[in-house]
Image (spheres, grey):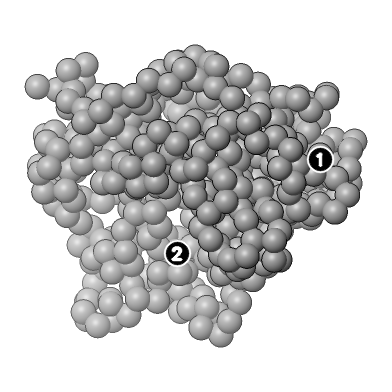
């Protein structure tokens, strides 16, 4: 009987052999992450338990990204405590402006194929883009990792999703993940692993693959795993990661469900106000007025996303009355976008650029609060009612290309219809 990627990675980190879905295993963790919104409890727990040593603390990164910069005294004091802890114990520290946890961990070379990685955020599924089992846990769980290097897991069942055919220009992994949300519903894959495969995955760049794994959190997935290929190996090597230990599913692996999506014919998608699984094709709702456009977050704040926006807006202006805010996912992306001239293009078009961080994903910092009756189109991952600080506003979710095209016209727009658009390069 064959095994899935999830069963193999968890089993290898427990007793060295593949596990079975439903089993409980105690597995060694290769790397852990804790961000500032969960660090307070974790650090208090270490003190409460009176740990005399933290043997795995140097394999735990502390990331100051949610309260970036800190909006109140409590957050500021948490940052001080995190910096002091990192100085004392030698933990990797990513400070305000360095970027979002799910971007800086792979950029920092902290994970590789076959690893087991945990973080204090549901979007820790992102690491599956690199053929690692990444999943979200609580801050106290990370305390246990720092003390013991281990956590317990229930091995998840797996849904295998085959993407058939490369995406059309103007269509991105965001549109695939929204399609999945439309099919399964929010939390429709609760505590299941997803395995994405097929020619559609092979054709994607790493940035898009990260979106594919990241957005699985909205489906409730425990992990979202891709097989490794030469693109994976090259990216990891360029970022100083350890030698890869790629893991493939067996041909006779047992899956809870198999789904096939014809990605070669897929149209751009959007999730409508308040419901991430109320998904429709962009052409079906084209013309919906928008007031604000947001590009960023751990889901779609990468360099390719910024390139998409710049390609569409180069030499043009935002529609009258539309505001646009861009938040890159990391300092490295910010610098790369500057070197390519992308921010010059976007600023000239009328957009504003924020420092790298979680920014306008959720109203933690208060950087942006939607006004009554405003319609926001965003490349973020969630559109809960009141997510941007005002329950009387609406949030629509789409790809960076859809967001930029809509900002250009002032209404929800299919990026493929924008004259002169080149979605593969910005300049």
| In the rendered image, the vertical position of residue 304 relative to residue 95, given as above or below | above
Q: Quadrant of the N terminus?
A: top left
Residue ID for mark 2: 35
Front in this rendered view, residue 216 or 114: 216
> Is disc 2 placed on a helix, strand or loop?
strand
* Distance from Cα at disc 2 to Cα at disc 1: 35 Å
> Is disc 1 placed on a helix, strand or loop?
helix
Extreme residue toward the bottom, this view: 73
Please state which of the two labelled residues, at mark 2 or mark 1, is closer to the viewer.
1
Percent of width and height locating residue 62: 44, 64
In which image quadrant can residue 121 be found? bottom left
Residue 305 is left or right of residue 251, and the answer is: right
Residue 376 showing in the rendered view: yes
Residue ID for mark 1: 408
Percent of width and height locating residue 183: 40, 33
In which image quadrant can residue 261 be found? top left
């Amino acid at each position: 009987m064959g095994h899935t990627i999830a069963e193999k990675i968890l089993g290898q980190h427990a007793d060295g052999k593949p596990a079975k879905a439903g089993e409980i295993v105690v597995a060694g963790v290769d790397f852990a992450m804790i961000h500032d919104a969960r660090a307070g409890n974790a650090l208090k727990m270490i003190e409460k338990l009176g740990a005399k040593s933290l043997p795995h603390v140097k394999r735990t990164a502390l990331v100051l990204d949610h309260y970036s910069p800190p909006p109140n005294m409590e957050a500021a004091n948490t940052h001080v405590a995190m910096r002091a802890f990192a100085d004392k114990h030698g933990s990797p520290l990513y400070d305000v402006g360095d970027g979002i946890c799910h971007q800086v961990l792979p950029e920092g070379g902290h994970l590789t194929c076959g690893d087991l990685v945990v973080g204090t955020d549901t979007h820790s599924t992102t690491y599956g883009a690199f053929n690692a089992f990444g999943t979200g846990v609580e801050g106290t769980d990370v305390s246990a990792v720092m003390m013991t290097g281990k956590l317990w897991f229930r091995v998840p069942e797996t849904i295998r999703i085959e993407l058939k055919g490369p995406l059309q220009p103007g269509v991105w992994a965001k549109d695939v993940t929204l399609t999945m949300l439309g099919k399964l519903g929010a939390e429709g894959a609760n505590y299941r692993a997803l395995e994405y495969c097929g020619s559609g995955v092979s054709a994607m760049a790493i940035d898009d693959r990260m979106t594919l794994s990241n957005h699985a959190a909205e489906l409730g997935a425990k992990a979202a795993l891709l097989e490794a290929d030469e693109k994976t190996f090259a990216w990891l090597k360029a970022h100083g990661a350890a030698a890869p230990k790629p893991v493939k599913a067996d041909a006779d692996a047992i899956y809870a469900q198999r789904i096939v999506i014809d990605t070669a014919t897929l149209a751009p998608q959007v999730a409508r106000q308040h419901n991430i699984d109320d998904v429709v094709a962009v052409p079906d709702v084209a013309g919906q007025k928008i007031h604000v456009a947001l590009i960023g977050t751990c889901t779609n704040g990468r360099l390719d996303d910024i390139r998409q926006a710049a390609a569409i807006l180069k030499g043009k202006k935002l529609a009258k009355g539309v505001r646009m805010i861009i938040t890159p996912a990391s300092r490295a992306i910010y610098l790369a976008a500057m070197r390519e001239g992308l921010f010059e293009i976007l600023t000239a078009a009328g957009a504003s650029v924020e420092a790298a961080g979680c920014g306008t994903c959720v109203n933690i910092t208060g950087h942006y609060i939607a006004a009554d009756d405003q319609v926001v189109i965003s490349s973020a991952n969630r559109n809960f009612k009141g997510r941007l600080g005002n329950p009387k506003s609406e949030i629509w979710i789409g790809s960076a290309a859809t967001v930029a095209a809509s900002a250009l016209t002032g209404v929800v727009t299919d990026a493929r219809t924008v004259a002169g658009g080149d979605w593969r390069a910005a300049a």
